[in-house]
Image: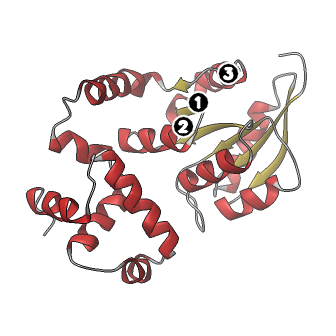
Amino acid sequence: MTDTYRVVLADDHTLFRRGLKSIIESVAGLQVIGEAGDGLELLNLLRTMTPELVIVDISMPNLRGIEAVREIRKQYPDMKVLVLTMHKDRSYLHQAISAGADGYLLKEDADPDLFLAIERIRQGKIYVSPHLEEGMIEDWVQIRRGNVSRSSQIEVLTPREKEVIKLIADGKSSKEIGELLLISVRTVERHRANIMDKLQLKKTADLVKYAIQEKYI
């Protein structure tokens, strides 16, 4: 890495950010130019600076990491994004990649894989933690072949999407769901669209049938 590669960090744990910054800047050519403690702060920060790479956690207040990734991809299509998280559940991995992340690295794999992940992403490649890569490939192969069972489909959904399914099946409107989950109607509709797409459903009635089959209601 010869040219300066500018990085912004987003994690709600200040001590973790400080440690991560120190590790990153120990390598010549890498510079942390900004830090954020939540998703909204991150998006505001990106209006004032243009890093080559954003390293973002999933579990953050105000705006979750996945939603932040989606907004970054929409507003800054050329900006690279690496999700650095403790979540091993492959549903989070699928969500991150679908939202536009260029990499997904488990915090437990950050030593020694962080710099490998950064370099791969810098080269325009996708990086996934070795612990998750094999499972991800298996998931996508099954989806492409159309061999995904109902039980494995539900594993692809995030915990929040599962909450939304139950409330939709209970007959709640998007406004009511938003009030119960403390999210906007627009976010509810986005969750609904993601669920329908993942489960390959076309109508709300099909979603209700699915919820009944999976014993959500």
Three-letter amino acid code of the residue under disc 3: Gly
Quarter of the image containing the C terminus?
bottom left
Judged left or right of residue 112, residue 75 is right
Three-letter amino acid code of the residue under disc 1: Ala
Please identify the quarter of the rendering in which residue 173 is found: bottom left
What secondary structure is marked by label 2? helix
Q: Pinpoint residue 133: horizontal percent, then vertical percent.
A: 42, 23
Going from N to C along the chain, the mark reached first, 3 or 2, is 2
Going from N to C along the chain, the mark reached first, 1 or 3, is 1
Taking the spot 49% from the left edge, 67% from the top edge, the residue there is 187
Q: Pinpoint residue 127: horizontal percent, then vertical percent.
A: 56, 24
Judged left or right of residue 14, residue 95 is left
Q: Nearer the viewer, residue 137 or 15?
A: 137
Which residue is under mark 1? 110
Taking the spot 40% from the left edge, 57% from the top edge, the residue there is 193
What secondary structure is marked by label 1? helix
User: Dots 1 and 2: beta carbons under 8 Å?
Assistant: yes
Q: CA distance from mark 1 to mark 3?
A: 19 Å
Q: Nearer the viewer, mark 3 or mark 2?
A: 3
Residue 107's mark?
A: 2
